[in-house]
Image: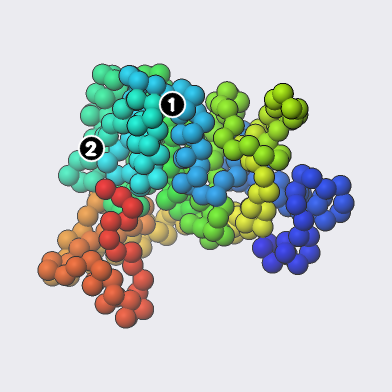
Amino acid sequence: GLDAYYRMYNANVHRGIHKLSEEATEAYEGARKKVQKFINAKSRREVIYTRGTTESINLIAQTWGRANLRSGDVVLTTVMEHHSNIVPWQMLATEKGFTVKFIPTLPDGTLDMDIYQKLLSENNIKLVAVMHSSNVLGTINPVAEMAKLAHDNGALILVDAAQSVPHMPVDVQALDVDFLAFSGHKMVGPTGIGILYGKRKVLNDMPPWMGGGDMISKVTLNGSTWNDLPYKFEAGTPSIAEAIGLGFAVDYLTQIGMDKIHQHEQIMTEYALERLVEVPGVTVYGPSADKKGAVAAFTVDGIHAHDVAQLLDSHGVAVRAGHHCAM
């Protein structure tokens, strides 16, 4: 997809009336439709291109958050979040005066749902921001249940699905989430491309974030009006080749089948965990294999994580070591 774009129809989208631009636009928008089908969004207009999960979450913070959050409100997230789902809310809270609170985990690495319900009932929660699957513990959070509880208490829910969309079937309508974000590079796609899904009504009510070409309907010296969804949130020349590449990644994963991928990874994870606990001095973290994604987090007694990673690398095994952009 990337190669074909740069060799055969390297042109901007939505702007030209010549053949190259039309071909580029068709491929670019075709990829959006593939993503729509992949996550079962109601409309392609609910699928916004971004640079990745981090930008998707920041977009929500700077548009929906800036317009709706104020002193006395609470954004509820979890202690297992990636920094990209904590820092944007902390930054905005400093400016707007709302509070960020955190759902704790139980000893097995799953969320404390009793505390979640308690926090929902006792606070003015406006948004629940939660990862679908932990990048450290692997925990798969019950986001459908969490979405229902959030909605019952008048809150919206944002799901960081960077670790789930590439590894298991994700249906945004079945989950009934208001926002969902993920990245292309975690699903055999290019870097620099991501997706923000949002319910159409919520997106329509949100102001734009960045200003520029293609996000406008009409510009005068006295003011401007905004384009329809999703283009209201896609200012300037987008990552065209990367979006097309993401579409090909979706084709590849769809051809294999997300159910098959998830089942295979569960088998591999269970095997990895069984073998790791047999190693003297190794401590494994997180829930059992049936409650987690394809992640095996562990430490080795008396050896720094970076030293373990370097030793494994010398044997051709690549692992992530350190804090993992998490708490």
Up-down relation of residue 196 to residue 120 (above or below)? below
Task: Give the mark nearest the N terminus, 2 or 1.
Answer: 2
Residue 230 vertical placement versus 139 (above, below): above
- Asked if residue 211 shows in the view, the reply is yes
Q: Nearer the viewer, residue 291 or 306?
A: 306
Secondary structure at badge 1 equals strand
Q: How far across and down, in percent of the image, does residue 121 sit? A: 28, 19
Residue, x 70% and y 33% (percent of image)?
Answer: 216
User: Label 2 sits on what residue type?
Assistant: Pro
Reading the image, the residue beneath label 2 is 104
Q: Residue 156 got which mark?
A: 1
Q: Quadrant of residue 314?
A: bottom left
Above or below, 73 against 38 in this view is above
Viewed as shown, does residue 88 lie left or right of 225? Answer: left
Residue closest to the eye, 246 or 24: 24
Residue 128 image point, x, y percent:
38, 30
List x then y, in percent, for residue 280. Answer: 13, 70
